[in-house]
Image (spheres, grey):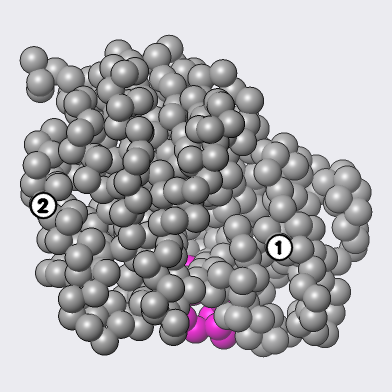
């Protein structure tokens, strides 16, 4: 059985890292898995990326061309929107030349593939939903408009007042293409996005299953807190609150403003905030207590040290699918506080391994932080956190579930 995982990147960004971990999990149980990417950051030989200068240049051009149609929407939100219109892609040809038994799509935006090229893929397709893009008119999260259930247009993400706008046209293009793809299985990584896909006009006729991302629990595991803090030069006697994500401060969906508001409601005195995924801003917000900006962490070992060093991780995102940060933190035995939205309940069991706050009440986020930090049995919380990941998301267990899905798809074609 030959599996080809297709992703815009290999290890840059949460969706790419999740796809790469699945690739690692599959190879770990003996599956012939390879990965095809638009831009390769790592050095793994089983990851196929542009090799020549010309190929790399074309990939870069596609990256810059794809968002050009959005420029007419001057007041659009910062939520990511991908038109998927750029031609002259050879991705479908490359996929077909590799002749896999299963083509497993993951996050394929940023100009990687034109939506029309999906119908040119010869093998059966499995598509993991890392966000909502596959079943919307272009937004990666829909700002709760729920137009994906019928049809897009007058897109609130674009702040468009026109019914026939880019979102309407892309929605129509997807509907036509998806109808032409007969062998496509959709994987919802969380129960929330699985249910969204089942209600969507574009995907509701497809086979839709719920399977999570895997995580390597041999890499992400607890480390002595004192040693971890010493390695990162963090204070030993303070209560450390962690916040982080890609573009942690600049992406409004990540909830930095909500975090700021929640932090202001804490009664804790002996506290520091630790932020990763962002450098220190030129004009940083004054929280009234120390803030440690640690920048970007790409290495899993460094992330393990980081999660082990803190007392609680806060993920105040307005919407999350199946957050890597939540999963990684729990695997390292660090409880998580987050809003009860999206896929967060798949990971966090309220008051067992963390705290699910009422959306979007910052006072409840503050209450959750204090509940974790003041907990009378921190070791119990830590053990519960790790056990949840070991039971539900451990790499080999999840990889075997994907292998079974692939086998069922292949058997049904015979």
User: Could you say which quadrant of the image residue 285 lies in?
Assistant: bottom right
Nearest the viewer among 27 and 315 is: 27
As helix, strand or loop, the secondary structure at mark 2 comes to: helix
Residue drawn where x is 88% and y is 58% of the image: 234
| 295 displayed left or right of 314 | right
Nearest the viewer among 355 and 305 is: 305
Q: Quadrant of the C terminus?
A: top left
What is the CA distance from the residue labelled 1 to the residue labelled 2?
40 Å
Q: Is residue 211 magenta?
A: no
Nearest the viewer among 333 and 89 is: 89
Which disc, if any, is residue 300? none
Mark 2 — residue? 176
Residue drawn where x is 61% and y is 59% of the image: 245
Q: Is residue 358 magenta?
A: yes
Circles 1 and 2: CB distance less than 8 Å?
no
Question: Does residue 333 lie above or below 181 as drawn?
Answer: below
The answer to whether residue 305 of the structure is visible from this angle is yes
- Residue 218, percent from left and from top: 62, 29
Nearest the viewer among 185 and 361 is: 185
- Counting residues from the N terminus, which is met first, the one under dot 1 or under dot 2? 2
Mark 1 — residue? 278
As helix, strand or loop, the secondary structure at mark 1 comes to: loop
Packing grade of label 1 (10 A; few <14, some 14-19, many >=20) is some
| 145 displayed left or right of 281 | left
Residue drawn where x is 56% and y is 70% of the image: 251
Q: Quadrant of the N terminus?
A: top left
Question: Does residue 409 lie above or below 336 as drawn?
Answer: above
Packing grade of label 2 (10 A; few <14, some 14-19, many >=20) is some
In front of the other: label 1 or label 2?
Answer: 2
User: Could you say which quadrant of the image residue 119 lies in?
Assistant: top left
Q: Which residues are magenta?
A: 356-366
């Amino acid at each position: 059985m030959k599996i080809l995982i297709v992703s815009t990147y290999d290890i840059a960004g949460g969706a790419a890292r999740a796809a790469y971990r699945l690739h690692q999990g599959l190879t770990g149980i003996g599956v012939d898995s390879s990965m095809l990417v638009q831009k390769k950051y790592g050095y793994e030989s089983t990851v196929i990326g542009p090799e020549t200068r010309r190929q790399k240049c074309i990939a870069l051009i596609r990256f810059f061309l794809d968002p050009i149609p959005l420029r007419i929407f001057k007041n659009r939100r910062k939520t990511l929107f991908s038109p998927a219109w750029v031609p002259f892609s050879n991705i479908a040809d490359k996929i077909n030349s590799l002749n896999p038994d299963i083509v497993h799509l993951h996050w394929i935006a940023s100009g990687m593939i034109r939506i029309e090229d999906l119908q040119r893929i010869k093998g059966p397709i499995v598509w993991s939903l890392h966000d909502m893009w596959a079943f919307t008119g272009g937004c990666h999260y829909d700002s709760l408009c729920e137009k994906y259930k019928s049809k897009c247009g007058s897109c609130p993400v674009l702040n468009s007042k026109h019914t026939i706008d880019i979102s309407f046209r892309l929605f129509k293009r997807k509907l036509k293409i998806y109808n032409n793809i007969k062998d496509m299985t959709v994987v919802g990584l969380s129960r929330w996005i699985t249910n969204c896909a089942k209600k969507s006009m574009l995907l509701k006729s497809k086979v839709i299953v719920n399977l999570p991302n895997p995580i390597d629990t041999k890499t992400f595991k607890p480390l002595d807190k004192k040693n971890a803090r010493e390695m990162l030069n963090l204070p030993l006697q303070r209560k450390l609150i962690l916040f982080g994500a890609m573009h942690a401060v600049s992406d409004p969906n990540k909830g930095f403003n909500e975090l700021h508001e929640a932090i202001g409601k804490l009664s804790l005195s002996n506290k520091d905030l630790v932020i990763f995924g962002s450098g220190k801003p030129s004009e940083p917000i004054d929280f009234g207590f120390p803030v440690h900006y640690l920048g970007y962490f790409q290495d899993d070992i460094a992330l393990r040290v980081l999660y082990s060093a803190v007392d609680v991780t806060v993920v105040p995102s307005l919407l999350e699918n199946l957050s890597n940060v939540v999963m990684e933190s729990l695997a390292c035995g660090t409880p998580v506080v987050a809003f009860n939205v999206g896929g967060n309940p798949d990971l966090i069991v309220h008051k067992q391994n963390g705290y699910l706050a009422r959306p979007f009440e910052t006072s409840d986020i503050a209450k959750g932080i204090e509940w974790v930090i003041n907990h009378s049995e921190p070791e119990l919380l830590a053990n519960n956190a790790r056990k949840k990941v070991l039971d539900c998301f451990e790499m080999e267990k999840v990889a075997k579930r994907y292998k079974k899905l692939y086998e069922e798809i292949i058997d049904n074609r015979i």
